[in-house]
Image (cartoon, rainbow, N blue to C red):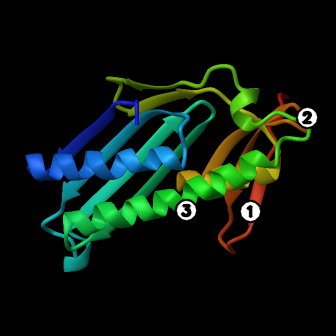
Amino acid sequence: MTVKIDIFTKNLELTDRLNDYVVKKVDKLEKFLDEVDECRVDLSHTKTARNANDRHVAQLTLRGKGFILRSEERSDNIFSAIDAALDKMKRQIRRFKGKRDRGRGDGQSIAEAISTSSVEYEEETEPVIARRKRFTLVPMDELEALEQMKLLGHENFFIFYNANTSAINVLYRRLDDTYGIIIPEVG
């Protein structure tokens, strides 16, 4: 993969063996999706996990033009957690490519519909607002927003620009496992 792979650890030492293992495995994702701009791998060890099988956590985040894919897996061994996260990422990539290839109705894929995609994180010192997050809204319909919500692992809500109504909407999960859409109006 020509992108830089950023590896971050928490409560875990990044040995040469572990670093080489991650780089070797993540490089293989290139044959599944070659439009990746940034790859982040977060590895952590939690001593106080209730279940011994959940002590090692591997989280993989891929960012590209018009998409963010994330997978996270837990295991009793960091290497098996990495393998499980990579398997999950491969499934998400196949799912994402299938949705993208079907198009948007106007012949454009999601990646083509957006000119620039950026996510910025700003830390605030104000005690009430812990973080501000900026991102470019990609025009999509409600079904695409639901799919993107699932791909990102967002379980509660997802903000998107509804291409059908030309308005910003909020897709959210209801307590009965159905979904609702909030359509804001200026009053």
Q: Earlier in the sequence, mark 1 or mark 2?
A: 2
Could you tell me how far apart the alpha carbons at marks 3 and 2 are, in whole angstroms?
Answer: 27 Å
Q: Residue at x 27, y 45 (%)?
A: 23
* Contact flag, marks 3 and 2 (Cβ < 8 Å): no
- Of badges 1 and 2, nearer the viewer stands 2
Which structural element holds mark 1?
Answer: strand
Q: Is 136 on the left-hand or right-hand side of 120? A: right
Residue 91 circle label: 3
Label 2 packing within 10 angstroms: few (<14), some (14-19), many (20+): few
Could you tell me how far apart the alpha carbons at marks 1 and 2 are, in whole angstroms?
Answer: 26 Å
Q: Residue at x 46, y 42 (%)?
A: 62
Q: Residue at x 27, y 61 (%)?
A: 57
Label 3 packing within 10 angstroms: few (<14), some (14-19), many (20+): some
* Contact flag, marks 1 and 2 (Cβ < 8 Å): no
Residue occupying the far front of the picture: 31
Say what amino acid the circle numbered 3 marks: Arg
Q: Residue at x 71, y 54 (%)?
A: 98
- Residue named by callout 1: 179
Evaluate whether residue 127 shows in this view: yes
Could you tell me how far apart the alpha carbons at marks 3 and 1 are, in whole angstroms?
Answer: 23 Å
Q: Quadrant of the N terminus?
A: top left
- Residue named by callout 2: 106
